[in-house]
Amino acid sequence: MSKHIGVLTSGGDCPGLNAAIRGVARAGQEAFGMRFIGFKDGFRGLVQNRFLELDHHLLSGILTDGGTILGTSRDKPHRMPMGDTVRDMTDAIVETYRKHHLDALVCIGGGGTQKNALRLQAAGLNILTLPKTIDNDVAFTDVSFGFDTAVGIATEAIDRLHSTAMSHGRVIVVEVMGHRAGWLALAAGIAGGAEVILLPEIPHQVEHVAEAIRKRSRSGKTYSIVVVAEGAMSKSQAEQIELLVAKKNKAKKKAQKKAASAELEAFHKEHVNHTVNLTAELEARTGLESRLTILGHLQRGGTPSSADRLLATRLGTACARQLAEGQYGYLIAARGDHTEPVLLKKVAGQKKLVPTDHAWVNTARELGICLGDGVGTV
Ligand code: F6P
């Protein structure tokens, strides 16, 4: 009997999702004679039994397309908004899985998806996952697909901002995505030749940034590009977060925990504006006209780079091989030119942040790029 496999994409979309769907399903069909269905809009499609047959016709021509032919959502199986309430829909998912007589479910997604996939494994489903995200923060894989394309888009934007910053003698702050990780900012900042790069992993002080810009200005260059990760924080903000997290962890009663969580949430909500405030502060401290560009979802759109097509395809074909072997409960990770199954229970709940002694951080410091912590540059 040929194996019957379900596939879904979940979390924020990114370039390379279609290449991964095609990689798994095409290799599964061609090399192992499996049949595939794709569930629509992440875990919600499993709850509502909305699916597509992933046949040759549907898989044809999607390699180069951005987004995902399956649609995606940030819905969690155990906390899904259903009408006016939020419900645990795990049983409905298990029912759909059984109804289709699936042998396994492939969940393609980022950090949140790995956690949700593990929950479904605990509910008795055979699961494999693939790592996608422009943030590159999925643990235990060298890299996730979507990242290379996003770095390319952000780098091109920085290139373009350079010429306008130079013409006007301005400071241009560029906010890039990355959630709580700085990979995208660091890679695009180095590749784009930024003067300053601010990461969540290295809390900064505005005065260090301002002084780096003033120093550059004194040397005759009155323009600067400041690349800021959306999750970057000042030193005092990082300390505040640390206190709030400690308060949450220490809370013994449910109500105390809830209150501490609400405080943390409020902090993050307020923090969304941090690059607006930083831009104004830099203008005030340097006397140079300053502008802000938020790249936002541009970084997630459009056709995947060739590196992401290759990565998503080889992770997909490795996943098909793993399905054929019937070895479940793994993330298919990228390891150099190869792939490696890593236990899902090891991956779920972990985040790959930029180590402060990472080779790219050292490269940035050696180039004299200011990282806002006062080390080396001022
Ligand atoms: O995880 C990918 C990502 O683009 C993050 O970089 C960003 O913080 C988040 O998703 C944005 O999410 P949404 O598209 O739901 O606003």
Image (tube, rainbow, N blue to C red):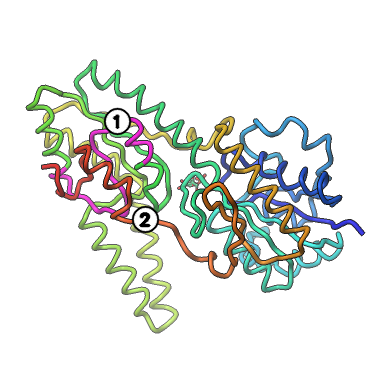
Which of the 4 quarters of the picture holds residue 13? top right
Is residue 232 toward the left or the right of residue 206 in the image? right
Is residue 48 highlighted in magenta?
Answer: no
Badge 2 density bin: few <14, some 14–19, many ≥20, Cα 10 Å? some
The x and y percentages for residue 363 are 28, 42
Extreme left residue here?
Answer: 218
Q: Residues within 10 Å of mark 1 (few under 14, many from 20)?
A: many
Task: Tell me the kind of residue under disc 2.
Answer: His
The image quadrant where one finds the N terminus is bottom right
**Closer to the camera, 26 or 275?**
26
Q: Which residue is mark 1?
A: 193
Is 244 positioned to the left or the right of 213 in the image? right
Identify the mark at residue 268; answer none if there is no mark: 2
Of residues 152 and 43, which is closer to you in this image?
152
Image x and y of residue 202, in percent:
27, 53
Amino acid at pointer 1? Gly
Q: Where are the magenta residues, as a range?
A: 187-208
Q: Position of residue 349 (x, y in %)?
A: 50, 66
User: Which residue is painted at 38% across and 36% down in the image?
Assistant: 188
User: Which is nearer the eye, 64 or 320?
Assistant: 320
Tell me if residue 195 is in the magenta stretch: yes
Give the residue at x 83% y 34%.
57
Q: State how far apart marks 2 and 1 are (Cα).
A: 29 Å
**Residue drawn at 70 percent across, 63 percent down:** 127
Residue 209 is marked as: none
